[in-house]
Image (cartoon, coloured by chain):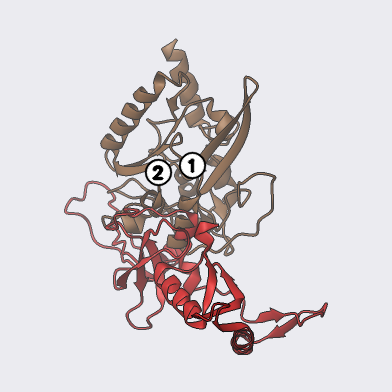
Amino acid sequence: MKLTRRDFFKISGAATAGLAAGGLGFDFAPVEAYAWELRTKDAKETPSICCYCAVGCGILCHTDKKTGKVIYTEGDADHPINGGALCAKGASSYQIAQNDKRAQNVLYRAPNSDKWQVKKWDWALKEIAKRVKKTRDATFVEKNAQGQVVNRCDGIASVGSAAMDNEECWIYQGMLRALGLFYIEHQARI
Amino acid sequence: MAGKSIFVDTTRCTACRGCQIACKNWNRNAASATKNLGNHQNPPDLDGNTFKLVRFSEVENEGKVGWYFFPDQCRHCLEPPCKDTAEGYVNESVIQDDATGAIVYTDKVKEAPFDEIKSSCPYDIPRRNARGLAVKCTMCIDRISNGKKPACVSTCPTEAMSFGERDEILKLANERLAALKAKFPKAQLLDADQVRVIYLVVDDPKKYHKNAVASLERGNRRFAAKRVIDSILRV
């Protein structure tokens, strides 16, 4: 039995290929021996944390050493929380990095408009920053009624986001507190 | 019969569908066009991009609702009828891996008539992918040949699935069956002596899925016939 490298590509759809090896040291049967290889065998493994719910499962991220692109993600067997297990959302986390169905643009509806406009991410981020700054400056309270210094912003509240990991949440709340916000809530508590 | 086996304890399955997605992730199978069937089963059936599917079925048990989950996949038969069928047309179109017993379709399978392969499967598993090739679960042959568990087994959060040497898995399955028998008199292992993917159910298998056990209605009737003969012999 011969299986060419090309054949095996086709069978498994895998990036790494095997080749037909010889017998296994005995020849009384038509031995079919294949060198099945892991498609992640040359990948760099980086431990990470699932970005979805509050359980915080460990994920191993396999990246191509040449391109730096994610090629596979799986539950981290050494992680004390999940021991290698992942639910459907965690198991799909590869698609966070590699996904041709991801939205490339944003839809913007201007105040009082009934039309969506397609805009670029850059435009949207700048616009959000501009409006946050405007509202924050307009509603910033330096001193309360008793004359005590409070340096707070009453005009903005933050709710969310379940799709941020622990570290992202920390940075995010740091930014909000720097703006003076105190209405800060997270999805996990709602 | 040496090699590997998978034990699927449906009483532990919460239908999170982690296995279904982990399977797609490892095999790099794309999303499938889907439609709402009125339950949580999604996509509606196995297809060229879905080798593993958690089937949901709502049944009535003495006036009460029963909700059964069945993570369906290739059973990796010890004597696979699909291999017999395909090899009748093209040699080496279906491989039975020596070390593990996994049944794997090669590219040559495209030269054998798909409809016959599909209908010879007692569990209605093979599907055609976008390239017209018959495809199905490979037991993650590339993973298990390198000391890893199949993607579905390693992701299961409730340990509903176990993977290992066949004799150990059979022992585990029988122990679990014995433990459940007292509470669930109908508990049973499905076709355990004929397949490598062994399901444990606690009710009539047909209530889980119409092809949960080798079906009499389907193609090569060897399995089904054996079941009938076995049941006669037991009487």
Residue under circle 2?
A: B158
Q: Amino acid at mark 2?
A: Thr
Residue under circle 1?
A: B14
Using residue B111 as the reference point, say whether residue B148 is left or right of it: left
Q: Are marks 1 and 2 on the same chain?
A: yes
- How busy is the neighbourhood of tag 2: few (under 14 within 10 Å), some, or many (20 plus)? some
Using residue B102 as the reference point, say whether residue B30 is left or right of it: right
Q: Establish if A169 lies above or below A106.
A: above
| Chain letter of the residue carrying label 2 | B
- State the SS at label 2: loop
Q: Residue at x 34, y 83 (%)?
A: A66
Instruction: Identify the image quadrant of the N terminus of chain A.
Output: bottom left
Residue A150 visible in rendering: no
Residue A136 percent coordinates (x, y): 60, 84
Residue B93 percent coordinates (x, y): 44, 54
* Mark before the other along the chain sequence, 1 or 2: 1
Chain whose colour in the figure is brown: B
Q: Amino acid at mark 1?
A: Thr
Q: Establish if B162 lies above or below B226.
A: below
Taking depth in this image into account, of A57 and B124 the one nearest to the observer is A57
Taking depth in this image into account, of B186 and A112 the one nearest to the observer is A112
Q: Furthest residue to the left?
A: A25
The quarter of the picture where residue A57 lies is: bottom left
Residue B183 percent coordinates (x, y): 43, 20
Chain whose colour in the figure is red: A
3D distance between C-alphas at marks 1 and 2: 8 Å
Q: Residue at x 29, y 50 (%)?
A: A30
Residue B168 percent coordinates (x, y): 26, 36
Contact flag, marks 1 and 2 (Cβ < 8 Å): yes
Q: Residue at x 51, y 25 (%)?
A: B203
Residue A22 visible in rendering: yes
